Amino acid sequence: MAVIQFITGVNETVVPDISLTRSRDGCTGTATFRFDDPDILKSSMEQQGDITGMYLKDEEGEIITRDVNAKFINGKPRGIESVYIIKSPDDWDRFMRFMERYCIDNNLKFTKA
């Protein structure tokens, strides 16, 4: 099963909006994840620990990014934005395999912009 976690062992159930960009040569890119009102920001999660990164986990292992930022509205956390930098064709292929599994597990579709 493909899952996203901000704290190891705690699955995020809110499905993010994900935007992908890719360089012209296809070797590098970015994946930007935007979560609206994610579980991890709920007050009941405070005892789970601190957000240490975004972990994309599946049967192959995990992809990690530390680029995680909370978005605040009227002084209250309302969302999370996280960016994963894809640095090579192998990283791109690995990320896409994770996304295929995540989409299947969450009944999502990929749409080109």
Image: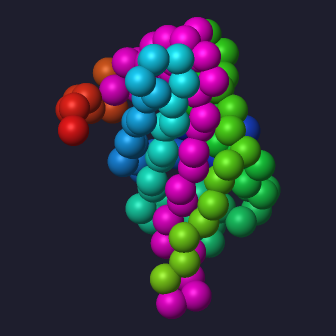
Q: Where is residue 55 in the image (x, y as percent from the top left)?
A: 65, 35
Q: Is residue 91 above or below residue 75?
A: above
Q: Residue at x 48, y 45 (%)?
A: 32
Q: In which quarter of the image is the C terminus?
A: top left
Residue 56 on the magenta segment: no
Q: Position of residue 105 (x, y in %)?
A: 36, 25
Q: Quick check: 75 above or below 53?
A: below
* Residue 15 visible in the shown view: no
Q: In which quarter of the image is residue 83?
A: top right
**Residue that lies at the very extreme toward the bottom in this rendered image:** 74
Note whether 98 is above or below 17 in the view shown: above
Is residue 92 left or right of 87 when viewed as pictured? left
Question: Residue 103: x and y, percent?
Answer: 34, 26
**Residue at image point 58% right, 9% down:** 90
Bounds of the magenta span?
74-103
Residue 38, x across and y down, in percent:
49, 58
